[in-house]
Image (spheres, rainbow, N blue to C red):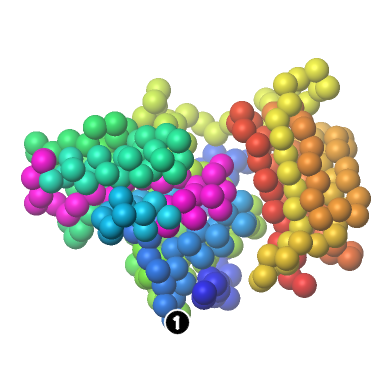
Amino acid sequence: MLTYRPSNVAKPYRHAANPPHLDKLSFTLDHIHAGNGSVCSTYELVRYLVHKNIPVTVFMQVTSPANDYELDKSNARLIYQLAPHLVTLGVHPLHAGHTQREQAEVHNILNYIIEEVTGEKPVLLSYHGHGAGPQNGIIFPGIQYARGIHCTTAPQPDPMNTPVMPLSSVTAAYNYIKKRNEAGQTATFFTHSCELRHNNVKKRVFDNLVKQVLSQRLNAVSYLDAMNQEFRGGATAPVDDSSISVPSDSDVKYGLRLSALTENAFQPLIANFEVRSTNGRVVATSTNKKQAQFHLPPAIYQANAVVEGTSITQPINLTLRQGLHQKFLFPV
């Protein structure tokens, strides 16, 4: 299976709407594509993102009714299980022009599939087709936010038709991210995995965005978290890291797992691991292990892995009541 190969790009993002906080964006993908000899599958693209600790939302459609939609369930399960704390599944309904009955039938099937895979009913949707968007008389029960396919925004933000960034150039995408964050909002990236072909402008935009996230010039957040912030109580300023208390032994503790892997084949490596609090205090260490498991209070941390003299440090946001698996990828 063809793995995702990023292009060699290096256009830095130099804006900051709320310094010292990073401007935010979210990654979304439509359809689950199989891929071919020239472009990777949606599974491989999602794997590429989550192995870099980047959240992604995948909007799936119904493709095969055989055996109670077993193929669709299997594809969704493979993608979701890559990283349940980073992957969100959403509904991709029929094209515009179908009746409420037809849309409801497919919507119910997708609800069933996603709930069986994730344990929760979906609350996210992306519209399907050229010029798609909300239609009079068409409703999707349970959906809280619907992502559109255009970068234009209405005078009043609409949770059922949220915009996406333009992908005509890297500069256009960067300018849009800046504008959205200055308004206290998050910019949403949208594509299909099959569109990220060699020398394609969408691939250049995508690769630059990922590189800027890894270089800590942009902050990748899940689409659901971004929309919750924007529409529930209004957009708010990013969390100030300094307001999060330094962890103490008496706090409730959550699981944190650290792994060192080879960048291409994802083979485990022996590493020394270290976790520090925001004030620089070492709170956990583990030496000569392929994986390290810690239980720490919720806080912002800096996690470090060292393999044969090569050191990688990544920020850890352990603020959710769930375990977190942080992977360090080494080019060996």
Is any atom of residue 288 visible in this view? yes
**Which of the 4 quarters of the picture holds residue 283?**
top right
Q: Position of residue 15 (x, y in %)?
A: 53, 52
**Which of the 4 quarters of the picture holds residue 309?**
bottom right
Look at 82% across and 39% down and name the residue there: 276
Look at 54% across and 72% down and name the residue there: 3
Tell me which segment is drawn in magenta: 75-101
Is any atom of residue 242 visible in this view? no
Query: Which structural element holds mark 1?
Result: loop
In the rendered image, the vertical position of residue 217 relative to residue 172, given as above or below = above
Q: Position of residue 164 (x, y in %)?
A: 34, 52
Q: In the image, 68: left or right of 236?
A: left
Quarter of the picture holding the C terminus: bottom right
Residue type highlighted by circle 1 = Gly
In the rendered image, the vertical position of residue 130 relative to residue 201, given as above or below = above
Residue highlighted by disc 1: 37
Q: Position of residue 82 (x, y in %)?
A: 56, 53
Residue 236 part of the magenta-drawn span: no
Look at 84% across and 49% down and name the residue there: 273
